[in-house]
Amino acid sequence: MSSRNSNKKLTIALVANTTWNIYNFRLNLIDKFIDEGHEVAVIAPMDEYIFYKDKYPTIRHFNLRMLDRDGTNPLRDMMLILELTRKFRKIKPDIVLHFTNKPNIYGAISSKMAGVKHSVAVVTGLGYAFIHDGFTQKLFSLLYKWTGRFHQKFIFENLDDRQLFVNLNIVKEINAIAVKGCGVNIDYFYPFPNGQIKAKTTFTFIGRLLYDKGIREFVNAAKIINEKYPNTAEFWVIGELDDDNPATVNGDDVLDWVNNKIIRYWGFVKDVRPLLSKSDCVVLPSYREGLPRIVLEALAMAKPVITTDTPGCRETVFQNENGWLIPSRNTEALVECIENFLSLGHDKRHEMGNKGREFAESIFNDKLIARQIYDEVKNLI
């Protein structure tokens, strides 16, 4: 008998800080829940990515007006708790999965107030608050510790974040699991075309333009390589400024990098596949990640990767097989790694890319991740 017929139909609610988050990272879960015969409700601030509902006409989407993902206004956060509580009482979900920090923290309180039986926090990355020591980190730790008891399960996207929360006594080890990020759609991201031989080797940084993602180290390394090896390499940057994030790059810096021809800046690109296909190596010198989706996309498209030996990033690379891990905040190490890549022959680069594709298929496949999370939901209920 299929699981569709043998399982009780559940109402599963997903809470996120943007509809963009739902569209980019959660459709694999939605597909799995619907395929198993359950009803899905989404609660997220409405943005241009609401078009995802064209594919899912049965999904009920609830706008979240009070969620300001980087705001620090306590009154607005209290109103968010009340707004979520009203929506939970209306939806009457059997289980709620919260994604990102504010839904995890304040959604826990709302779940308790609304009488939701099963609440799950999905920690997708700890970001600025846990990269920089100080008041914000202490505050988030205290809030997670206070509200964490209202969740029955914590799901982390890397092992380091899981261990950190266990060590901080936010969650008991038995109630915490780690999966390999949100996964990557290996049918959408695939090698096309691949293995071109070009006059210049292209190194590509893709992500929000935040200093915490290592963009400064990437640009400094590009400057050094361009001076040492003229007309040998190109350095591309793809992504947008994030003015709401304290670590956002100064626009004047970007202008300086472009004017001095250190990088080629493509801005925000909705479909990165054409540019990824023309890249030889993807570089993400980030200080901390949940599990970097762009690296998974690069692996799925058979691109070798240079990233850092930091939480989240280190789980995407098997040293010298599909890429390299380097210390974070270290331009010299990045330069050395880029030089090593430049010295590789075409066949070796191609071999590393193919190994990355194998890892994407066997470890980071988004259908595999969705099944793991679904099994946790079933076990919890």
Image (tube, rainbow, N blue to C red):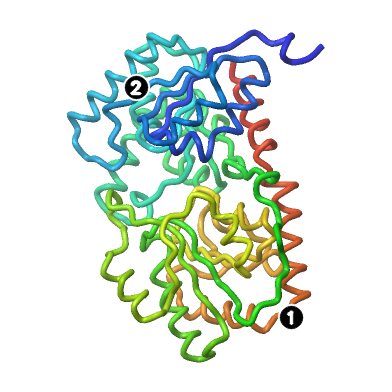
Helix, strand or loop status at disc 2 = helix
Where 180 falls versus 60 (above or below)?
below
x, y percentage for residue 165? 46, 41
Query: Do the CB atoms of the residues marked 2 and 1 lie less than 8 Å apart?
Result: no
The amino acid type of the residue labelled 2 equals Ile
x, y percentage for residue 360? 70, 50
Q: Nearer the viewer, residue 71 or 123?
A: 71
Quadrant of the drawing holding the N terminus: top right
- Which residue is located at x 55 percent, y 81 percent? 233
The Cα atoms of the two marked residues, 2 and 1, are separated by: 56 Å
Residue under pointer 2:
109
Residue 44 horizontal side relative to residue 178, left or right: left
Q: Decide: few, some or many residues near mark 2? Use Cα within 10 Å; few <14, some 14-19, many ≥20.
A: many
The amino acid type of the residue labelled 1 equals Gly
x, y percentage for residue 151? 45, 24
Q: Residue furthest right?
A: 1
Residue under pointer 1:
345
